[in-house]
Amino acid sequence: MNEMTASDMLRDPLIRQMLRADRISLASFATLLDTVSRRQASRAAESAPPRPTVPEAWSGEALSSP
């Protein structure tokens, strides 16, 4: 099963019907999706393993000729 994108959710007729029934505006729902997406991306970046440092010998300066 494929996950829905935020754009898919905003266009989905069933989700729109539920939003209307709950008296939630499409704009409010779009803001909620954006906020949650940004928060998840931020948390993923914080919990990502640290990137290894490049030894000085591998930098472009060490490989260039005088």
Image: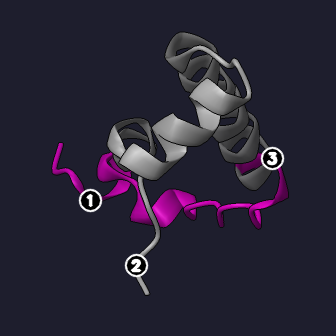
Mark 3 vs mark 2, CA separation in Å: 23 Å
Q: Mark 3 points at which residue?
A: 43
Count neighbours of disc 1 (C-alpha within 10 A) and say few if under 14, some if 14 to 19, many if 20 or more. few
> Of helix, strand and loop, which one carries label 1?
helix
Q: How is the image coloured?
A: one colour
Residue 47 position, x and y percent, is 83, 58
Asked if residue 48 lies in the magenta stretch, the reply is yes
The image quadrant where one finds the C terminus is: top left
Q: Is residue 28 something one can see in this rendering?
A: yes
Q: Mark 2 points at which residue?
A: 2
Q: In this view, does 2 lie above or below 27?
A: below
Count neighbours of disc 3 (C-alpha within 10 A) and say few if under 14, some if 14 to 19, many if 20 or more. few
Q: Which amino acid does label 1 sit on?
A: Leu
Asked if residue 23 lies in the magenta stretch, the reply is no
Question: Which is closer to the viewer, label 3 or label 1?
Answer: 3
Q: Mark 1 points at which residue?
A: 63
Range of residues picked out in magenta? 45-66
